[in-house]
Amino acid sequence: MNPSIPPYDLESRAHELLPPEVYIYYAGAAGAGATLAANLAAFDRLRLRPDVLTGTIAPDLSTTVLGARLTLPVAVAPMALQGLAHPEGDMATARATGDVGTAMILATLASRSLEEVVAAPCPLWFQLYVLRDRGATRALIDRAVAAGARALVVTVDAPTSGHRRPGVLSEFILPQGTRLPNLAGLPAPTPGAPLREYFATLVDGAVTWKDVGWLRSVSPLPLVLKGILAPEDGRLAAEHGVDAVVVSNHGGRMLDGAVATLDALPAVVEATAGRLEVWMDGGVRRGGDVFKALALGARLVLVGRPVLWALATGGEVGVRTLFTDLRNELETTMIACGCAAVGDVAPRHVTEGTMIGTPRSPR
């Protein structure tokens, strides 16, 4: 990967390199793509308001998340089928993530197994869909614990596959020979059938807060709920003993017209009142975006699609370069805004403003 390509331009190069059906699967969004567009526009709308004359020249970008010390407040969001972007897939991502000193969330539908990826030198958290088969769900949790995963990140915003335009993402079919090693022992996808059909037979769409209590009872790992947008749900998560929530709309892939995650973030932070950690994802493309999310109360910012584009264009080196670029831009922004540490980034450093220039397109 050309190091001069900024993170937010990687998609164009990945689009050229990936098979069309894989690119569409990664890039696709629900409906007309309004949620994905809103995620991006929310960052463009928020303006920075720096403190000056602070003497800040070498800010500390490190933070502590679920007891793990990270060198920067950015980690890898869970993303399925990374092996379609690069032969080493999740392994390349995990090695690059470890090299830069941060964490990765491994997807249930990962191309590599828990046991393989956990060997990489980075904190590994495991993303879990609650399966229709509770025994299989429990076995997967036990497997994550045995492998050494440090947290369980449960996706709660996918009761059904998002509505996509017919013939596009909804009809994505796994390429022949694709492995789903974390689901070994469960029925395999039917050859030639859309992935959404397999997902619907596998995942329980009727999960409730009662199931959150069950997950807490069967897992010794810190519990994170991914997919919170309403402050009331953040409050309920705290009441159910959850350790962290991810303010997320599934990257715009589930519900078209949903609130942008950056817009939802402050109310969730207020509702949880420090009783749990609040993370966010959705629309993060630049180090400046990370700064804005921190200013609105995020403890950790997850990056999704840019990692896939970096993986497709440069493998492990590409992902490492992406995180180096994000780190450098975040550091520059913190210096310019007078923030000596991540904890110094505050709501006063951002303000609503008129969008300048052309909004970033979700393609």
Image (tube, rainbow, N blue to C red):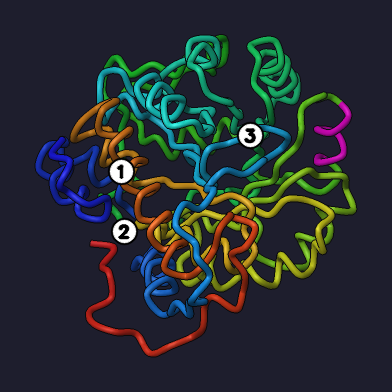
Residue 189, percent across and down? 43, 23
Q: Secondary structure at mark 1?
A: helix
For the question of whether residue 225 can be seen, the reply is yes
163 vs 209, left or right, is: left
Q: Are marks 1 and 2 in contact (CB under 8 Å)?
A: no
Q: Earlier in the sequence, mark 3 or mark 2?
A: 3
In the image, which is nearer the foreground, mark 3 or mark 1? 3
* Stretch in magenta: 211-217
User: Which image quarter: residue 283?
Assistant: bottom left
* In the depicted structure, whether residue 153 falls above or below residue 277: above
Residue tagged by mark 3? 69
Between residue 321 and residue 16, name the one nearer to us. Answer: 321
Q: Are marks 3 and 2 in contact (CB under 8 Å)?
A: no
Q: Amino acid at mark 1?
A: Tyr
Q: Decide whether the magenta segment is chiefly helix, strand or loop.
A: helix
Between residue 151 and residue 194, name the one nearer to us. Answer: 151
Residue tagged by mark 2? 165
Which residue sits at x=26%, y=55%? 8
